[in-house]
Image (cartoon, rainbow, N blue to C red):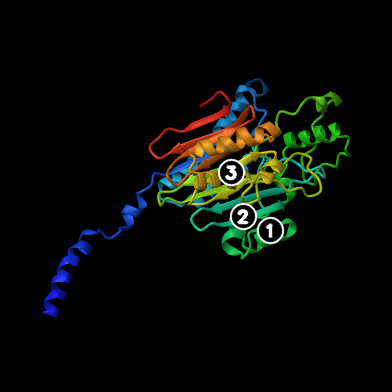
Amino acid sequence: MQRMLLLFLLAMITPTFAQSPAPSASSARTTHKWAVVLHGGAGVIERNSMTPEAEKEYRAGISEALHAAASVLDRGGSSVDAVEAAIRILEDNPLFNAGRGAVFAADGTNQLDAAIMDGKTMTAGAVADVTRTRHPISLARAVMEKSPHVMLVGPGADAFAASVGLEQVPPSFFFTERRWESLVRELKREHLPIPPRPAGAPPAPAHDAAFFETPDNHKYGTVGVVALDRAGNVAAGTSTGGLTAKRWDRVGDSPIIGAGTYASNQSCAVSGTGIGEYFIRYTVARTICALVQYRGMTLQAAADLVIQKQLAPIHGDGGVIAIAPDGQMAWSFNTPGMFRARLAEGGTPVVGIYRDEP
Ligand code: ASP
């Protein structure tokens, strides 16, 4: 009798198992549509401050990076791979304040900061004041994946980069005349001494004294990328030379996890750009994700709350890009412009610079 009962019970439950489909790898892969959002810096970027040619170059640079990330994601690559691929392109593009083309510190060096975070594992890597590693974002990734640490700084960070085989370059690799001129202008404005041109830099073009009195339209250009892959994982990365004429080995928000860079599959991924001191004090990236996670706000509302309601009134100039595991994309900035772009699987790319663009 007992045996009969057992058989009956088994017969009752077996179909239940049979009905629940085994999760297949392909269904897991295609659950999510990929998406990517990037920025190339926020600031006083206005139509009258840019020539049509310069504008074209910026849009082309942003689009190239967007498509690099998109092609990684479209092949089924990870969000971390997409973030790194796009930022490497922007680091090599002299228009942007990251890698080659980074702004100069007051002592005439390029001191580079970068961070990357994987929302799936909540692991992160960051570097600050790097001077010899061609791709700081790849170094940040190496810190995340190949070291037991989260953040390395200065010569130690470059030494670690060399030890894991990342390309090392002479500091003059990062030199651009435009950023040098910005440094000279800023140092003159602050009545600070002007350092000698870096070893290996090309000879100085002739300028009259008035040249350095004109205002600087090229202060910005930090780069950041957030991505969502087909597996539903988000990641964020940011890379920058920081602020022109920074002193005392100043470090901004970009490499500070939770300030300029943050990613968690439980909420969102964010990369910021602007005056880093505000982004650090207001833990901008993590606050946006916390609003999504604990208050259930939409990504756009959370980004707007922090950027427009918290930072704007205290002159915390800047902006963010953000993405969520459910495919929401957002950007928000309280400056006249932000270089930005986004693309979701099956959609068309949106590229913008000025405030009045979509
Ligand atoms: N947030 C960067 C920093 O403070 C600079 C920028 O985004 O323009 O280092």
- Ligand 1 picture quarter: top right
> Which amino acid, by three-letter code, is at mark 3?
Ser
Which image quadrant is residue 284 in? top right
> How packed is label 1: few (under 14 Cα within 10 Å), some, or many (20 or more)?
many
Q: Are marks 1 and 3 in contact (CB under 8 Å)?
A: no
User: Which residue position is annotated with label 1?
Assistant: 152
* Residue 190 relative to residue 116: left or right: right
Q: Separation of disc 2 and disc 3 at Cα? A: 14 Å
> Which amino acid, by three-letter code, is at mark 1?
Leu
Q: Are marks 2 and 3 in contact (CB under 8 Å)?
A: no
The correct choice, above or below, for 342 with respect to 15 in the image is above
Residue 227 placed where, x, y %?
Answer: 49, 45
Give the number of the disc on residue 271.
3
* Residue 26 relative to residue 106: left or right: left
For marks 2 and 3, give the one nearer the viewer: 3
**Mark closest to the chain's N terminus, 2 or 3:** 2
Between 213 and 332, the residue placed more toward the observer is 332
* Residue 103 relative to residue 291: left or right: right
Q: Separation of disc 1 and disc 2 at Cα? A: 8 Å
Secondary structure of the residue carrying numbered label 2: helix
* Residue 94 relative to residue 235: left or right: right
Residue located farthest toward the front when viewing the structure as drawn: 1
Give the number of the disc on residue 140.
2
**Mark closest to the chain's N terminus, 1 or 3:** 1
Which image quadrant is residue 210 in? top right
For marks 1 and 3, give the one nearer the viewer: 3
Residue drawn at x 81%, y 32% is 185
Q: Separation of disc 1 and disc 3 at Cα? A: 19 Å
Residue drawn at x 56%, y 61% is 145
Give the number of the disc on residue 297.
none
Secondary structure of the residue carrying numbered label 3: strand
